[in-house]
C-alpha cells in the first residue's frame, strides 16, 4: 500500500546521536514508499566572527565547516544507503529559511526532524515551533526518544463549527485532512487509531472565579447537547471519508472515539498521554486567512505538554511568509 507522503525531507541539526532519527525517517519513508532526502542544516558563523579573526580566516573557517559537514554526511550516507536509497545535502545559514525554501523549491510533502531540547523540559524548541508555524507542508517532529514503531495514533480534531461561515468550510477540510493523515499512518503502522475532541461549554476559570452564575441542571443539559452535536459532526466526517477509502477500511481500523468535556489546553494532552500515544496528528490553526500566523495558544500549549511525536497539519490555502526570495545565498 502506498502511503500519504511521496517526497520526504529529514532535517538534522547536528552530527550527534543521529542514528535513531535516521532509522525513524527511513522507517517512515519505507512505509510510504517515498523518496528520502537527508539535509544537515547548520547555523552559519555569527556576523561578528570577523571581528576576532582576519577576514581570510573567517572565510576559511566557514568553508572548512561546510567541507567537514559534507564529508561527514557523505560518509554517513554510505551506511544509510544500505537500508534505503537516500539523497543528501548540506546547508549553512538560517535553518528556518533553508528548510522552508528547500521545501518550496523541491516540493517536499513532509519534513521530519527530532524535537529540539528546550528550557523547562518542553518538548519543542524554537526552530520546531517556527517550522510548525511557517513551513508550507506537514512537519513531523519526532520525540527525543524515538520509537521504532507506532502502536497508538491520535487524530486531534476541533469539531466546534460555531464560527463565521467563511471559516467553517476551512475547519471542516482541516479536520478531514488531519484524519486522512492519521488513517494512513495507522494503516501503515498497523496501529490503533484514536480520535480525540475536547470541548468546553463555559471556561472553567470564569465559573470558578464567580464571574457568572451557572445552573448546574441546565449546564448538564447543555453539555449533553454539545456532546451529541460533536458526536454527529464526527460521524458525518467519518462517513464522508469512508467513500475515499478501500472497502471495510474503517471496520478494520475500528477507531476509538474520545469526546471529552474539559479545558482543551490541558485535556488534549492529558487524554493523549492516557492513551499511551506514539504520535498525534493535529492542526495548528489560530487565525484563518492570515498567512504565516497559524500557531494558536491551544496548539502551542498542548505541544509543550506532550511526550510523543507530533505531525502538524496546515489548513488549505496556507501560504508561508517565507518565499524563495528569502533563500540564503
Image (cartoon, helix red, strand yellow):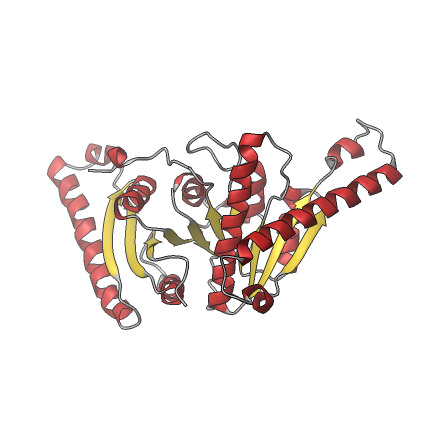
Residue drawn at x 45%, y 29% is: 290
Give the image location of residue 60, x and y in percent: 13, 44
Give the image location of residue 108, x and y in percent: 32, 50
> Looking at the picture, does residue 178 appear above or below residue 79?
above
Residue occupying the far left of the picture: 56
Relative to 274, 290 lies left or right:
left
Residue drawn at x 25%, y 37% is: 327
Please tell me which residue lies in front, 55 or 1: 1
Tell me where residue 9 sits by quadrant.
Answer: bottom left
Relative to 273, 24 lies left or right:
left
Relative to 286, 76 lies left or right:
left
Please tell me which residue lies in front, 8 or 301: 8
Please tell me which residue lies in front, 208 or 239: 239
Could you tell me if residue 120 is visible in this image? no
Residue drawn at x 15%, y 46% is: 63
Residue occupying the far top of the picture: 211
Please tell me which residue lies in front, 227 or 239: 239
Q: In which quarter of the image is the C terminus?
A: top left
Q: Quadrant of the N terminus?
A: bottom left
Give the image location of residue 91, x and y in percent: 24, 47
Give the image location of residue 192, x and y in percent: 58, 65
Could you tell me if residue 8 is visible in this image? yes
Amino acid at each position: 500500500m502506498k502511503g500519504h507522503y511521496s517526497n520526504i525531507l529529514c532535517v538534522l541539526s547536528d552530527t550527534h546521536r543521529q542514528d535513531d532519527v535516521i532509522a525513524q525517517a527511513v522507517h517512515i519513508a519505507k512505509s510510504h514508499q517515498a523518496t528520502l532526502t537527508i539535509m544537515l542544516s547548520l547555523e552559519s558563523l555569527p556576523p561578528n566572527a570577523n571581528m576576532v579573526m582576519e577576514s581570510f580566516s573567517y572565510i576559511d573557517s566557514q568553508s572548512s565547516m561546510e567541507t567537514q559537514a559534507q564529508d561527514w554526511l557523505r560518509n554517513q550516507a554510505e551506511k544509510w544507503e544500505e537500508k534505503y536509497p537516500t539523497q543528501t545535502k548540506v546547508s549553512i545559514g538560517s535553518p528556518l529559511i533553508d528548510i522552508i525554501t528547500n521545501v518550496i523549491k523541491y516540493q517536499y510533502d513532509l519534513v521530519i526532524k527530532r524535537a529540539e531540547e528546550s528550557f523547562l523540559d518542553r518538548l519543542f524548541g524554537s526552530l520546531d515551533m517556527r517550522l510548525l508555524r511557517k513551513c508550507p507542508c506537514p512537519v513531523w517532529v519526532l520525540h527525543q526518544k524515538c520509537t521504532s514503531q507506532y502502536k497508538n495514533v491520535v487524530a486531534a480534531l476541533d469539531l466546534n463549527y460555531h464560527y463565521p461561515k467563511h471559516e467553517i468550510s476551512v475547519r471542516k477540510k482541516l479536520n478531514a485532512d488531519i484524519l486522512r493523515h492519521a488513517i494512513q499512518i495507522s494503516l501503515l503502522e498497523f496501529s490503533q487509531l484514536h480520535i480525540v475532541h475536547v470541548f468546553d461549554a463555559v471556561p472553567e476559570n470564569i465559573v470558578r472565579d464567580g464571574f457568572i452564575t451557572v445552573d448546574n441542571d441546565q449546564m448538564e443539559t447543555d453539555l449533553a447537547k454539545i456532546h451529541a452535536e460533536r458526536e454527529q459532526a464526527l460521524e458525518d466526517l467519518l462517513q464522508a471519508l469512508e467513500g475515499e477509502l478501500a472497502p471495510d477500511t474503517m471496520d478494520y481500523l475500528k477507531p476509538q472515539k474520545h469526546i471529552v468535556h474539559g479545558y482543551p489546553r490541558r485535556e488534549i494532552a492529558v487524554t493523549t498521554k492516557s492513551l499511551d500515544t506514539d504520535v498525534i496528528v493535529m492542526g495548528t490553526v489560530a487565525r484563518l486567512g492570515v498567512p504565516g500566523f497559524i500557531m494558536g495558544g491551544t496548539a502551542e500549549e498542548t505541544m509543550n505538554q506532550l511526550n510523543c511525536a507530533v505531525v502538524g497539519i496546515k489548513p488549505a490555502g496556507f501560504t508561508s511568509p517565507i518565499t524563495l526570495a528569502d533563500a540564503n545565498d
